Image (tube, grey):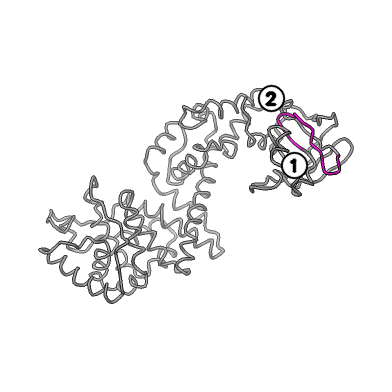
């Protein structure tokens, strides 16, 4: 059987032994008073601050875990001062003696003598027979209680927020703590959705936010700024509206020394007209014209209704009869749809609010969970598959959580760090 060190960490951490009477390989009685603190770093012993009784001697120190005791030498621990305080070597198989510098043998616990067969069978099912499965536990997850899964989903969502906040942090540093500038970049990126995300991101980064601030009082100037930087105003000689934008953009580009050479091309192919980059740019301009203190307004909003009202913008009059610069269409206001606003809240506003609350030292996770719990779950291939497996998909907290679950845990087979995987092992190990 292939053995995984993470599984051995799990066995030691949660004391998953089928006997309360443990002994070292030298026959001394072993009592675990405290298994220790799991070391999540890359170096050093696996558990710190462990407390054990071996024979009649009480020990306090570190515990190291390996598949085979000979791995001690494979990893050169015998020459590493960090391992001098190891009081117990926990292994699956004891194949060689391990000694301290003073030539005393390090006590060893051989785990394979103390693990129940059902627990091993579950471990094998998760890790050794999952190559053709979408997730390792897809046949077993229906046996896990909804309470366990729902609680894990909330933790996963908070973990996802932490990850998103970590990505925002360097952006904030690059913007010298200008939260409005960071918001502009994140919002613009979200306006590109999947097809034009990188193009919108490059557009936002090509414009110093100080320029956006100075132009925000005038919708025409904002449109000229955004469309001009996007490169979408080229070769539009017969369109008076576009010509006016081009004239204004030429003035702005000269005044603020702007260049759009690094802006990526925008794509229209296979997009619904409502998602054309022209419409999204016009909506972005209207949003920043109507809300010249957008960041402050969003941070002050504490309900889904308040956030939705701020984001519920349309376009200027020209775009009510156009999807592109070239062709006139039936009159139709181009307001942002409810679904689009919700994506903006999920992917941009809530993570930034979380980051801002953290920055201020405020506790705001409950407020954000409340907002997210009122949003419909995202519908995609991953959320649909989890739903067929019986995983709750009632709101955006649930859908965001399973995206995190699949990416971070299932795809990497980190079942032993997953509450669902742990529960499955617990159920079989009893």
Alpha carbon separation for disc pair 2 and 1: 22 Å
Give x and y (percent) for residue 5.
65, 35
Point out the stretch of residues depicted in magenta: 89-103
Mark 1 — residue? Answer: 63
Q: Earlier in the sequence, mark 2 or mark 1?
A: 1
Query: Are discs 2 and 1 less than 8 Å apart at CB?
Result: no
Give x and y (percent) for residue 110.
75, 30
Look at the magenta stretch and give its main secondary structure: loop
Query: Would you place residue 214 above or below residue 421 in this image?
Result: below
Q: Is residue 418 left or right of residue 402?
A: right
**In the image, residue 128 lies in the stretch drawn in magenta:** no
Q: Regarding mark 1 in the picture, which secondary structure is present there?
A: strand
Foreground of the two, 352 or 395? 352
Mark 2 — residue? Answer: 116
Residue at image location 31% in from the left, 49% down from the top: 195
Foreground of the two, 429 or 94? 94
Give x and y (percent) for residue 291.
33, 67
Q: Residue furthest right?
A: 56
Foreground of the two, 62 or 299? 62
Residue at image location 79% in from the left, 36% down from the top: 98
Residue at image location 84% in from the left, 32% down from the top: 29
């Amino acid at each position: 059987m292939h053995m995984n060190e993470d599984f051995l960490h799990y066995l030691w951490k949660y004391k998953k032994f089928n006997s309360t009477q443990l002994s070292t390989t030298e026959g001394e009685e072993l009592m675990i008073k405290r298994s220790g603190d799991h070391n999540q770093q890359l170096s050093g012993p696996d558990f710190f601050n462990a407390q054990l009784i071996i024979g009649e001697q009480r020990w306090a120190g570190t515990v190291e875990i390996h598949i085979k005791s000979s791995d001690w030498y494979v990893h050169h621990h015998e020459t590493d001062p960090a391992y001098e305080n190891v009081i117990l070597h926990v292994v699956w198989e004891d194949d060689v003696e391990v000694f301290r510098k003073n030539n005393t043998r390090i006590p060893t616990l051989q785990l394979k003598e103390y693990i129940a067969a059902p627990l091993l069978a579950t471990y094998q099912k998760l890790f050794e027979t999952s190559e053709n499965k979408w997730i390792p536990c897809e046949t077993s997850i229906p046996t896990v209680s909804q309470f366990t899964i729902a609680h894990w989903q909330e933790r996963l969502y908070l973990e996802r927020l932490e990850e998103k906040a970590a990505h925002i942090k360097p952006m904030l540093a690059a913007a010298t703590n200008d939260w409005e500038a960071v918001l502009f970049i994140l919002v613009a990126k979200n306006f590109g959705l999947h097809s034009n995300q990188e193009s919108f991101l490059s557009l936002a980064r090509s414009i110093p936010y100080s320029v956006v601030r100075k132009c925000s009082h005038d919708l025409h100037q904002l449109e000229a700024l955004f469309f001009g930087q996007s490169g979408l105003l080229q070769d539009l000689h017969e369109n008076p509206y576009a010509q006016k934008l081009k004239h204004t953009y030429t003035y702005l580009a000269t005044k603020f020394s702007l260049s759009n050479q690094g802006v990526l091309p925008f794509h229209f192919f296979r997009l619904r007209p409502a998602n054309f980059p022209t419409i999204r740019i016009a909506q972005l301009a209207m949003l920043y014209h109507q809300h010249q203190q957008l960041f402050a307004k969003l941070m002050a909003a504490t309900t889904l209704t308040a956030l939705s009202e701020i984001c519920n913008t349309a376009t200027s009059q020209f775009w009510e009869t156009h999807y592109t610069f070239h062709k006139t269409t039936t009159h139709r206001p181009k307001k942002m749809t409810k679904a689009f606003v919700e994506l903006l809240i999920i992917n941009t506003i809530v993570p930034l609010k979380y980051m801002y609350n953290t920055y201020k030292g405020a506790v705001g996770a409950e407020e954000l969970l409340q907002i997210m719990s009122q949003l419909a779950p995202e519908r995609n291939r991953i959320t649909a598959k989890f739903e067929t497996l019986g995983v709750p998909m009632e709101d955006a907290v649930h859908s965001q959580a399973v995206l995190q679950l699949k990416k971070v845990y299932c795809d990497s087979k980190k079942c032993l760090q997953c509450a669902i995987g742990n529960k499955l092992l617990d159920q079989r190990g009893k």
